[in-house]
Image (tube, coloured by chain):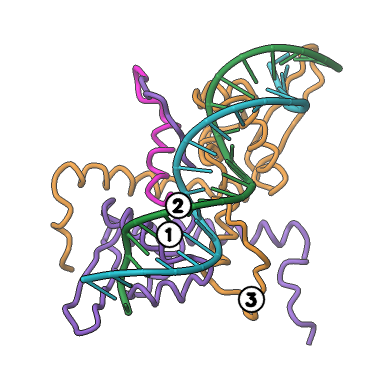
Chain colours: A orange, B purple, C green, D cyan
Amino acid sequence: MTLKMRKNRSPQPPEPCLLTECMQVIAGAWAPNVIWSLRAGPRRFNELKADIPPVSSKVLSARLSELEERGVLLRHVRPTSPPSVEYELTGLGEELIPALEAIVEVGHKLKQLRGYEVASEAAE
Amino acid sequence: MTLKMRKNRSPQPPEPCLLTECMQVIAGAWAPNVIWSLRAGPRRFNELKADIPPVSSKVLSARLSELEERGVLLRHVRPTSPPSVEYELTGLGEELIPALEAIVEVGHKLKQLRGYEVASEAAE
DNA sequence: CAGCATCCCCAGGGATACTG
DNA sequence: CAGTATCCCTGGGGATGCTG
């Protein structure tokens, strides 16, 4: 989802590209997982890393930075002896939860359908 | 969002990766736009292409195939003289609309928070 | 009209190693 | 603990051209 987007010199902002722009909020392979992991409350770096096993520190760190910069989550540094950092969703970030849940639900249903028959719901 | 996912040999399916799997439903840079364009009803290939100017035929076609295969949309071929194909969301596909809307809304709010340079339209 | 085929590119991500 | 720094590699996507 990179979208090299040359110049995007559109007279009127075309709606679909607006969508694409907004989708950047959850851009990055693991961004949705981060949000998902934070939906139950604040978590620390290594907790997130443990929540999302396949993610590397580098990428996790990159995603967290982006999401913070975008205003999806907050970073709290606690000046403890071993450094400890907590990440927490902002209010806007929490608004993404229902969206992710919806997608997950559709994803599940879709997977089940593909086991049986897809064309059943064709009409309607 | 490729997620090379070696083997995914996880004892218990970790939830976040389940999310990742579900997110694949709208994987691909322009998939959300396709769904978005179809939310108002069936549309034809070139209409979609016009709706989403930056997308190429190749990619649009690829996305449409994927989305069809996943059960998000249906493909109707009408045997007219010049071939004419209509794409239409399935019921499950329509369930994604609210999710996209939520993301778009958050995206907007986020952009406004980050400064008002966003919609700096022609200063009338 | 609707769409493949081809070629190319590069940003995002994996792996590994290192640090304050 | 919580990240950076490097290197490499993959595949999704852009551009262009051609077909039924």
Q: Are marks 1 and 3 in contact (CB under 8 Å)?
A: no
Q: Crowdedness of circle 3 by 10 Å Cα count: few (<14), some, many (20+)? A: few
Position of A59 with respect to B7 (left or right) is: right
- For residue B9, what is the image quadrant? top left
* A116 up-or-down from B122: above or below: above
Q: From the viewer's perspective, is A89 left or right of B60?
A: right
The region drawn magenta spans: B10-28
Q: Residue at x 14, y 44 (%)?
A: A116
* Residue type highlighted by circle 2: Gly
Q: In the rendering, which numbered label is found on residue B28?
A: 2
Question: Pointers 1 and 2 in contact (CB under 8 A)?
Answer: yes
x and y, in percent, of residue A51 in the image: 51, 25
Q: Are callouts 1 and 2 both on one chain?
A: yes
Which chain letter goes with mark 3?
A: A
Numbered disc 2: what chain?
B
Q: Is mark 3 on a helix, strand or loop?
A: loop
Mark 1 vs 2, N-terminal side: 2
Dominant secondary-structure state across the stretch colored magenta:
helix
Residue at 58% from the left image edge and 25% from the top image edge: A56
Amino acid type of the residue tagged 1 in the rendering: Val
Residue on which the image places disc 3: A10
What residue sits right under mark 1 in the picture? B59
Q: What residue is rendered at 56% in x and 66% in y?
A: A17
Query: What residue lies at 34% left-to-right and 17% top-to-bottom?
Result: B11
Looking at the rendered structure, the secondary structure element under dot 2 is: loop
| Type of amino acid under label 3 | Ser
Q: Which of marks 1 and 2 is in front?
A: 1
| Badge nearest the viewer, 1 or 3 | 1
Is the same chain shared between marks 1 and 3?
no
